[in-house]
Amino acid sequence: FLPRLAAAAAGSNASGSSSSNEPAIPGANASAAELYQFGVKVHGLWGLLCREVSPDVAAHPERHSLLPLPNRTVVPGDRFREVYYWDSYWVIRGLIVSQMLTTAEGMLGNLMSMLERVGHVPNGARVYYINRSQPPLLSAMVRTVYESLPSGTNSSALIRRALPLLVSEHQYWTSPPKAVRLQGKDGTVHELSRYWAAWYQPRPESYREDAALALNVTGTSDPAQNPAAARLYHDLASGAESGWDYSSRWFGDNKTLATVRTTQIIPADLNAWLYQMESNIAWMANITGDAAVAERFTAAAAARKQAIQELLWDEAEGMWRDGILSPTVNSTNSSSTNPDQVYTLTQNPHVFASNFVPLWTGITEGSASQGAAVVQALKASGLIGPAGGRLCVVWRGELPGDPAPGE
């Protein structure tokens, strides 16, 4: 990793700066030696982020909130003691860049062990996270590690272990009440998924904050006294399942957590990741020679792509949108658990980074014109800055010192 960084830095220094019209990027004029030392420091952070679960967790689970894991793991920040689901995708990408493939494989093993025991990959490796998951990126992690394995290794063993587990994870995400039936403009009924945690109380990790919010919004922190409190707790936990905890994309008024409505939203990014999962499962099934599974998930990916394109695509603006549920029959609220309920959607008009995730997962493959339109929309969205990006361009404005709109 470090020699490659130094070589890239030397090449960059030799070629000089690009167009003077481009915005200045911090560090762009650093020398090769400076970038190399920066790389040394970044690489050294892996040691600070490594964790190993004590054997006592497996021996005496009643004494711990941690879940047992078979391998060492890497946490997303040094304040954490437990691994988190979707953070692990980017951790694994970084480990592979750093040529720490064994550690990346161990992280995959940890996630798959939780999937085997729990039936889904929990939000994180804690008992109190089992009620929900996080964005389903395990198939992408498996594919990333598989494609990084040296030639000559028994790489198919990874696929053979992962494939049935990913099929079971797919069922978790595509069964009611996570799965929702939706009516298109021509009357066709499609199926997409939403975040839906199995939790109706204050979250243990944020108990005080959740209870205080419910008391302020509903007049009580006791879900048994007021169903509105239970619904609020449910939407808070479901927002945590999204990994966007919390964003104005989940708020009814686009400003305040008190109006959180996560379970009423069909997220563009979640369904793009599920499309990616279905495509990856079909790819893995072809590797193992399981034609039936390959055919089944190729069809599932095609059906989801059609639903995403018909229901969430905004042709005028060149991006996808989150859909907001509206009941059509036999329901008085859009959080009904009736699996036969059919809903209609209205699109959330605001701009979020999640609107562009379908581009990353390959939804536009086969349509160069749509791909170009999305890239142009992303460039014009206000999300991209000289040295990074924003998650949204909606101003919450609910806290003292909040930045100006768009920041």
Image: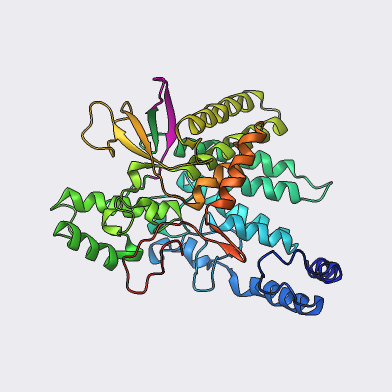
Q: Quadrant of residue 6?
A: bottom right
As drawn, the residue found furthest toward the top would be 187
Q: Is residue 127 magenta?
A: no
Q: Nearer the viewer, residue 194 or 387?
A: 387
Q: Quadrant of residue 394?
A: bottom left
Q: Residue at x 45, y 39 (%)?
A: 172
Rendered location of residue 201, percent (x, y): 26, 55
Rendered location of residue 154, percent (x, y): 77, 45
Q: Nearer the viewer, residue 232 or 266?
A: 266
Image quarter where the N terminus lies is bottom right
Q: Is residue 195 above or below residue 216?
A: above
User: Is 299 positioned to the left or the right of 209 in the image?
Assistant: right
Q: Is residue 362 visible?
A: no
Q: Is residue 188 magenta?
A: yes
**Magenta stretch in the rendered image:** 183-195
Rendered location of residue 320, percent (x, y): 50, 40
Q: Residue at x 46, y 55 (%)?
A: 243
Q: Residue at x 66, y 24 (%)?
A: 291
Q: Nearer the viewer, residue 83 or 257?
A: 257
User: Is 51 positioned to the left or the right of 31 in the image?
Assistant: left
Q: Is residue 30 above or below residue 150?
A: below
User: Is 281 positioned to the left or the right of 320 in the image?
Assistant: right
Rendered location of residue 92, percent (x, y): 64, 57
